[in-house]
C-alpha cells in the first residue's frame, strides 16, 4: 500500500486496488460461518491484527484519495508450490520421511481448507470487480466446508500409504475455527469452489512426490526462504544497486566489528543512492527492529539468516545472497549493480551508462600492469590450492594462463542487465562451491569467471563507468563511482 501512496504523490492515477487480506481478521469470532459484515474486534494473534490494519488503511485511502479497493480474505489456501511453512507441506514432508509432526489441540481445530485453483479464479474475478459507489469491499475466498485438522492428516496418510507419527500440543494464539460464508463472493464475483479437501490433497501429494524426486527443486524452492524484507515498494521492475552490511562473521579485510556495526559504515553509500533517487537494496544480518529506520519506498532493507550459507567468508557469501535474492523476485529488476558498501559512493546514475544488454560493466581503471599480473596470479594460485572439488571447463583452476594477460577486475563495483548478472552469479557461486568455504576466494574467482565467461569486448572495465580507486575526484565527468 505504500506503493499506492507513492504513486499518488507522483501524480499517477490509481483508480482501484486489489490486495490480500486473511481469514485471520475474524480472530476469536464465535459467529459462524464468518461473514464480511461481522464485527472484527477480537484478533487472536498479531498476524490477524496486522491484516485487519491493512483493511482499515484501505478504507482510509478511499476516504482521503477516493481509491477504491477489494480485500480478499483467504481461508487456509493450499496446493502445489504452496508455502513450505504451512501445515499441508509440513505434514506431508514429515509423514513421508517418518518424522514426528506436532498437532495442536488433538487435531480438533476446524479449518476451511481452500484449494489454490479455486482461489485463483476468485482473484481473477475480484480484479474485475468495481462498485459504482466505490469504497472498500472485502470478500471471503474459502471453501465453505470446514474440516478437522485430523482429517487433513488422514487424507495425507492415505495418499502416502504411511501412518503419521504424532505429538500433541496446546495451541497458543491459534483460531479454533475458520469457516467462510461465501454468499457475497458467489453473488458479486461468481465465485464457486469445487475442490474437496480429499481431491486437493491427492493433487498436492502427487506434486510433492514429484518435487521430492528432483533434488534440484529443493535448491530452487528454498532460495530466498531466509530473507525478511522491509521497504523498496516503489522499486518493482526498476534497476537496483545492491550492497551488503554483515558483521556476524569475521571480515578478512575489515576485522573491526565495532566499526562495521556503526551505521556510518555504509552511510556514504546509502546517502548517495538516496540523493540520486536510485533504488537500493541493503542486505544485513543484524539490524533487527532498526530496519525500518533505514527502509523507504526506494530503499529495501533485507535481513539474511547467514546460518543457511555455511561458514563462508563475508566477501564470498554476498554472491550467494545476491543470487538467491534475484531468483526469488517475481518482478525482477531489469539492471543490477552489486557494490561494496563501506567504501563506495555513487556519483552519477550508473544505469545511464550500462546500456548494453549483453555487456558486463565493472567500475575500475587499469592498475599498474606489473602489479596486475603478479597480484592476480597469487589470487589464482591460492584458489587452486584450496579447491576441494575440481571442475573441468569454465571452472578449471589447474590452468589459468589464459587470463593472466587481461586487466584485473575488482568485485567492488560490478553489474549489467539482469540476464548478464544472473549468469555471472550462477558461475561465481558454482566456482565458490568447489573451494573451502571458510577461505576468502571471491577476487580470484571473479576474475577467473569474468574472463572465461565473457568475451573481452563484452567486458566494460573503465570509462565512462569508472570507480577512482583511492581518489575522491567527484568533479570528473567520467566518474560514476568513488571506490575507496
Image: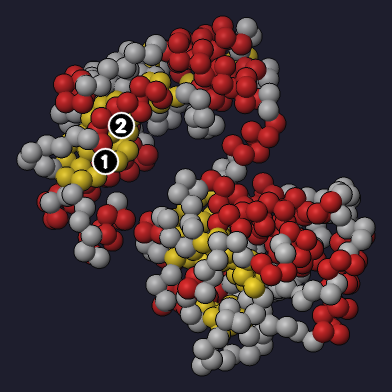
Q: Residue at x 56, y 17 (%)?
A: 205
| Residue depicted at 75% across the width and 50% down the height | 430
Q: Which residue is mark 2?
A: 123
Q: Position of residue 262 (x, y in %)?
A: 56, 73
> From this viewpoint, is residue 437 visible?
no
Estimate how packed mark 2 is, as few (under 14), some (14 to 19) or many (20 or more) residues with alpha carbons within 10 Å. many
Residue 69 horizontal/vertical position (percent): 20, 42
Considering every residue shown, the one lying at the far left of the view is 133
Give the answer, above or below, for where 185 lies relative to 150. below
Q: Which residue is mark 1?
A: 18
Which residue is pictured at 57% across the width and 64% down the height?
416
Picture quadrant where residue 470 is located: bottom right
Q: Position of residue 10 (x, y in %)?
A: 25, 65
Front residue of 308/188: it is: 188
Up/down of 387 relative to 446, above or below: above
Q: From the viewer's side, name the closer residue of 169 and 460.
A: 460
Quadrant (top left, top right, bottom left, bottom right) of the C terminus: bottom right
Whether residue 13 sits left or right of residue 283 in the image: it is: left
Assign a secondary structure to mark 1: strand
Query: Would you say the residues marked 2 and 1 are in contact, meaning their CB atoms lie under 8 Å apart?
Result: yes
Q: Position of 322 compared to 189: left or right?
A: right
Amino acid at each position: 500500500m505504500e506503493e499506492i501512496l507513492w504513486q499518488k504523490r507522483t501524480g499517477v492515477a490509481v483508480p482501484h486496488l486489489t490486495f490480500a487480506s486473511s481469514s485471520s481478521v475474524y480472530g476469536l469470532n464465535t459467529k459462524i460461518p464468518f461473514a464480511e459484515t461481522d464485527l472484527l474486534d477480537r484478533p487472536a494473534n498479531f498476524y490477524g491484527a496486522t491484516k485487519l490494519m491493512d483493511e482499515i488503511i484501505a478504507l482510509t485511502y478511499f476516504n482521503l484519495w477516493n481509491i477504491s479497493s477489494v480485500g480478499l480474505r483467504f481461508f487456509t489456501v493450499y496446493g502445489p508450490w504452496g508455502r513450505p511453512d504451512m501445515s499441508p507441506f509440513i505434514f506431508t514432508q514429515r509423514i513421508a520421511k517418518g518424522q514426528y509432526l506436532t498437532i495442536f489441540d488433538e487435531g480438533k481445530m476446524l479449518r476451511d481448507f481452500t484449494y489454490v485453483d479455486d482461489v485463483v479464479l476468485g482473484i481473477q474475478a475480484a480484479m474485475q470487480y468495481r462498485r459504482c459507489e466505490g469504497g472498500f469491499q472485502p470478500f471471503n475466498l474459502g471453501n465453505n466446508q470446514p474440516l478437522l485438522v485430523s482429517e487433513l492428516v488422514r487424507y495425507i496418510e492415505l495418499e502416502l500409504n504411511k501412518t503419521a507419527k504424532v505429538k500433541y500440543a496446546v495451541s497458543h494464539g491459534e483460531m479454533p475455527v475458520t469457516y467462510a460464508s461465501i454468499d457475497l463472493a458467489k453473488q458479486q464475483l461468481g465465485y464457486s469452489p469445487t475442490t474437496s479437501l480429499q481431491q486437493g490433497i491427492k493433487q498436492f501429494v502427487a506434486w510433492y512426490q514429484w518435487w521430492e524426486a528432483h533434488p534440484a527443486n529443493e535448491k530452487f524452492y528454498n532460495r530466498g526462504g531466509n530473507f525478511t524484507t522491509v521497504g523498496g515498494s516503489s522499486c518493482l521492475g526498476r534497476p537496483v544497486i545492491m550492497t551488503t552490511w554483515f558483521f556476524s562473521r569475521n571480515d578478512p579485510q575489515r576485522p573491526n566489528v565495532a566499526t562495521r556495526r556503526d551505521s556510518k559504515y555504509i552511510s556514504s553509500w546509502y546517502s548517495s543512492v538516496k540523493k540520486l533517487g536510485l533504488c537500493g537494496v541493503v542486505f544485513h544480518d543484524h539490524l533487527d527492529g532498526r530496519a525500518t529506520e533505514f527502509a523507504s519506498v526506494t530503499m529495501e532493507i533485507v535481513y539474511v539468516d547467514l546460518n543457511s550459507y555455511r561458514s563462508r567468508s563475508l566477501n564470498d557469501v554476498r554472491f550467494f545472497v545476491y543470487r538467491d535474492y534475484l531468483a526469488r523476485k517475481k518482478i525482477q529488476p531489469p539492471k543490477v549493480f552489486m557494490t561494496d558498501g563501506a567504501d563506495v559512493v555513487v556519483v552519477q546514475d550508473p544505469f545511464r551508462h550500462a546500456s548494453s544488454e549483453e555487456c558486463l560493466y565493472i567500475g575500475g581503471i587499469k592498475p599498474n600492469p606489473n602489479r596486475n599480473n603478479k597480484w592476480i596470479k597469487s589470487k589464482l594460485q591460492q584458489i587452486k590450492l584450496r579447491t576441494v572439488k575440481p571442475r573441468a571447463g569454465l571452472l578449471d583452476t589447474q590452468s589459468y594462463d589464459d587470463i593472466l594477460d587481461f586487466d584485473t577486475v575488482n568485485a567492488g563495483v560490478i553489474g549489467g542487465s539482469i540476464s548478464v548478472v544472473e549468469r555471472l552469479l550462477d558461475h561465481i557461486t558454482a566456482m565458490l562451491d568447489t573451494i573451502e568455504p571458510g577461505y576468502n576466494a571471491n577476487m580470484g574467482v571473479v576474475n577467473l569467471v569474468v574472463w572465461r565467461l565473457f568475451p573481452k569486448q563484452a567486458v566494460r572495465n573503465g570509462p565512462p563507468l569508472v570507480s577512482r580507486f583511492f581518489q575522491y575526484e567527484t568533479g570528473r565527468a567520467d566518474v560514476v563511482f568513488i571506490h575507496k
